[in-house]
Amino acid sequence: MPLETPSRIVRELARRGYNAEREAVTLIASAADPATALGRAVEDAPDDALRLTAEDVRTVLEADSLAADSPTSPAAGPSSTPAVTPDSSATADSSATADSPPESGPTGNDGTTHHGADERDAHAEQPSTRDPSVSTGTPPDTSPDEAGGVPPETEGSWERSSTAERRSIEIEGDVTGRSTGTGEYEQFVTVFRDRYERLSKRLRGRVNHRPATAIQEMTGGSDASMVGLVNDVRSSANGHWIVELEDTTGVFPCLVTKDRDIADQVDELLLDECVAVEGTLADDAGILFVDSLHFPDVPRTYRPTTADRHVQAALISDVHVGSQEFMADAWHRFTDWLHTREAEHVEYLLIAGDMVEGVGVYPDQDEELDVVDIYDQYEAFSEYLKEVPGDLEIVMIPGNHDAVRLAEPQPGFDEELRSIMSAHDARITGNPSTVTVEGVSVLMYHGVSLDEVIAELPEEKASYGDPHKAMYQLLKKRHVAPQYGGHMRLAPEEKDYLVIDDVPDVFHTGHVHKLGWGKYHNVLAVNSGCWQAQTAFQKSVNIDPDAGFAPILDLDTLELTVRKFV
């Protein structure tokens, strides 16, 4: 068994029903006879064990060493344990391709691309490139397929950099087990009222809010301000914009003239989002001429929290096991890399939905399935997940291809699916959820609403080519899915779980199968691409996916490194 392919050991352990700590795998790989060490470790493992520990392997290796040194011990014969056979999908060279496309943007004297500290560059910040085998920063104009390069493989035994006792994960905003909606009209009223109350609090400090009914009673020419949900946006015959705002008392029309500086902000408005306006009433008091428009937004002074040690998290999404286009080879390279010394600081894996391809998600999907049963898809995903080092902490949320309800917020997987994916003891939470990892808050949202944002807003403000810019809009609106209708299905709950109450340090999404990242008011927004090559359906709708990438986040600096495994 080649020592440079630890994931082959993991796959053999998975075939026998076991997971393993990362150190346990490296101990087996560095043994004189890895196949024998693996077989003995499995044979001597406790009957109820699902995970081999480093201590289990050390016990076996020490016992074999003592037996070999004993003068009364017979000469060692051939092992009866079958050798671990390399998986046919594994490559001969297990080194992970770690390049992303070349940088674009402002450069320093050394030729590298740097973060801009000035908030004026919030929409175009680019972290510095620290290594020719990796890429950091905002997505460049070139295709990810143009990138290349192979980092050196690390051989030999090594131990992880820290103990599990130093890790911490806290989860907030999870609807799992708390869903009470039955779909009645009154419940939709409740959830939108909750949205208004929570977001309007963030705006009332900026304007002298008056209810719609109070503004209707004011005299013409008076100054007035209002906070409301966007009920309608339409253009007038002479090219001005009429925006109807609704609060808990009624609806009032507002006019933004085309010659005002704020006219381009109207292009960013989505129905049902909460905004504030200030202006002057017309002479007949029938409409408000808008002078300024405010979004809940992330404060420009926001400063994120960081971990107090060097530790990393891998951010991925859209694995799509069960699809004929699932990229198993790229996945194997990724999990191979996680077993190397180069990845020793990666202690967390955050997966933002779509573990499997699902069934009946889009027209003629059955023709593109490699696994046609939904439960078999999760069984297969579980086997692939076992290739991940056993000492990584894993957090997963569902997506629109997963076997959960489509309406958001989505509860986490049910008990039957959890039992299928139990071997790695992953933490499963709802979509969306805020996962705080060693003090760094990561808002995980699968991202169905990105389709709505991209469809409604101008291309320069939201596009599939730059998915992080659409994420900026959600941060600006302080809501992960502001517009109801279309692709966005809303579950009426006692509160709106989709409001972004607290500013996250990192915003992680998937869904659109495009790679993009950047900073908005010091919040790192990351859309992590996918692990599925282009399907016939994606080709028909002109989606060219960015597949086989793994963004690696330094939790102590919030710098991002994107590694390529294709």
Image (cartoon, rainbow, N blue to C red):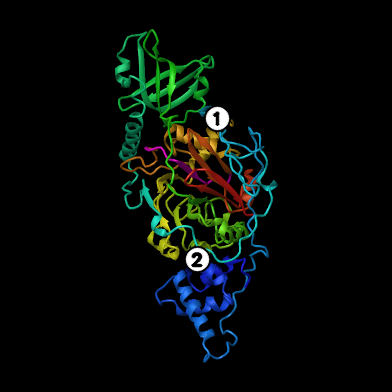
Q: Going by the image, does 113 lie left or right of 197?
A: right
Name the residue type under label 1. Asp
Query: For the C terminus, which image quadrant?
Result: bottom right
What numbered label is drawn on residue 490? none
Magenta span contains residue 319: no
- Give the SS element for disc 1: helix
- Label 1 to label 2: alpha-carbon separation: 43 Å
Q: Is residue 220 above or below residue 21?
A: above
Q: Considering only order in the chain, which callout, 2 or 1, is on the residue closer to the N terminus?
A: 2
Could one spot residue 52 in this view of the protein? no
Q: Residue at x 44, y 31 (%)?
A: 271
Q: Are marks 1 and 2 in contact (CB under 8 Å)?
A: no
Q: Name the spot of residue 296 as percent of width and height, x first.
A: 40, 29
Question: In this figure, which residue is indicated by the disc labeled 2?
Answer: 23
| Frontmost residue, 342 versus 9 | 342
Q: Is residue 540 above or below residue 219?
A: below
Q: Residues within 10 Å of mark 1 (few under 14, many from 20)?
A: some
Magenta span contains residue 508: yes
Range of residues picked out in magenta: 501-514
What numbered label is drawn on residue 121? 1
Q: Residue at x 46, y 62 (%)?
A: 391
Q: Name the spot of residue 542 as percent of width and height, x first.
A: 64, 43
